[in-house]
Image: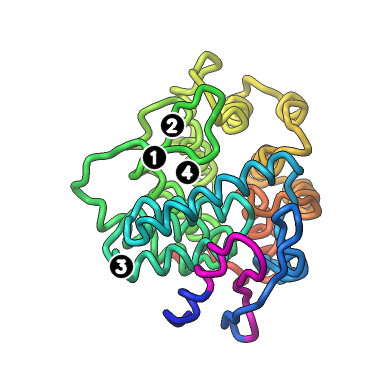
Amino acid sequence: MSQALNHLLIGGVLAAAGACWGCRLGAGGQRSAEPFKRAGSGELTAASRIPEAISLLATPLFRPQLGPASRAHRDEELKLAGTRYRQTPRDEGTIIWLGRRLAYLGRYHQAIAVYTDGLSRHPDSYKLLRHRGHRYLTVRRLDDAISDLTRAGRLIQGVPDEFEPDGLPNPRNIPRSTSHTNIYYHLGLAWYLKGRFEQALVAYRRCLEYSANDDMRCATSYWLYVTLRRLGRDREAAAVLEPIGADMDIIENFTYHELLLMFKGARSIPQVLGSLSAESIDDATGRYGVGAWHLVNGEQETALEIFQGITSGPSWPAFGYIAAEAELARSGQENAVGTPAADS
């Protein structure tokens, strides 16, 4: 994207009313500017007809719909972020929050454009690279995510870890993830989605080193366990489960905790599935975990049925949904998102 188009896009994002500019993926992966009219609720009506992403199964994915109260609240937060950005447009923090507020509204390409503009001002910002890498994952640009997150991992070497403030706080309003964990967690996921499990393993082991609370230990241990099982390293995978207990202090990653207990034999599959809400993003997370369990235990047909069910639902930004796409793509076209044997 050119700097001129990037600035045009951001100018539209900041517009209080009237025409707004979005960015969509065009032929050959090029982006083009597209004018939208703002509806009364703050929803961009034309944007609902333009895909935010193309799935790993080559289907268009449209902006997720939010309930009226959630949308109104997030619209207000975006306006506040826009005001702060106008006041201090070169500040790394205000750039990040503008991008995050856009992403919470499902405006992922606009968020990426904001981070890209910020990186033109702060080219060595591991924080901007971490956030753009995350949203590259959301829109299925896996190679771009790996590039950003790998570079962020190099830049953050030797930097003391710090908690990252939550944009969507947990019930106790206590941040659980950190600068280091967010880089390595998302990098591990990007490699996992590509089917490059050896590289995913390196990232998740690194992430676990920085996972200093039970929520992050569970989230990281979940993907680490599944990665090791995919590599056939079952004894090492079993060791990952040893510190996992029912009495852990979990604030937000309840589904990962339940899945780990299931892997350990302390929960049944019906218990895990019964704890999920179809309206929550955790539904895709939990069902993918159950599907992955069937997969690593040789029950591929059952696993693929579960993955197909996930991808018929609405929660396409969820990591479990993306992982289900990756499994289905690999099952039908071996090199669609990477081949495990291609590790090098």
Measured Cα–Cα span from mark 1 to mark 2 = 7 Å
| Residue pictured at 56% horizontal, 24% vertical | 171
Relative to 330, residue 216 above or below = above
Q: Residues within 10 Å of mark 2 (few under 14, many from 20)?
A: some
Q: Is residue 111 left or right of residue 344?
A: right
Which is nearer the N-term, disc 4 or disc 2? 2
Q: Which residue is mark 2?
A: 175
Specify the segment rendered in magenta: 9-27
Q: Is-magenta flag for residue 314?
A: no
Measured Cα–Cα span from mark 4 to mark 2 = 33 Å
Measured Cα–Cα span from mark 3 to mark 1 = 21 Å
Residue 318 screen position, x and y as percent: 63, 49
Label 4 element class = loop
Return the mark for residue 233. 4
Relative to 262, residue 325 above or below = below
Q: Which residue is mark 3?
A: 121
- On the rendered image, what quadrant is the C terminus found in? bottom left
Label 3 element class = helix
Are the residues at dot 1 and dot 2 in contact (C-beta closer than 8 Å)? yes
Label 1 element class = loop
Q: Is residue 257 visible?
A: yes
Q: Nearer the viewer, mark 3 or mark 1?
A: 3
User: Which image quarter: residue 239?
Assistant: top left
Residue 205 screen position, x and y as percent: 37, 43
Are the residues at dot 4 and dot 1 in contact (C-beta closer than 8 Å)? no
Q: Seen from this angle, which residue lies furthest left? A: 158
Are the residues at dot 3 and dot 4 in contact (C-beta closer than 8 Å)? no
Q: Residues within 10 Å of mark 1 (few under 14, many from 20)?
A: some
Q: Nearer the viewer, mark 3 or mark 2?
A: 3
Q: Which residue is mark 1?
A: 164
User: Which image quarter: residue 74?
Assistant: top right
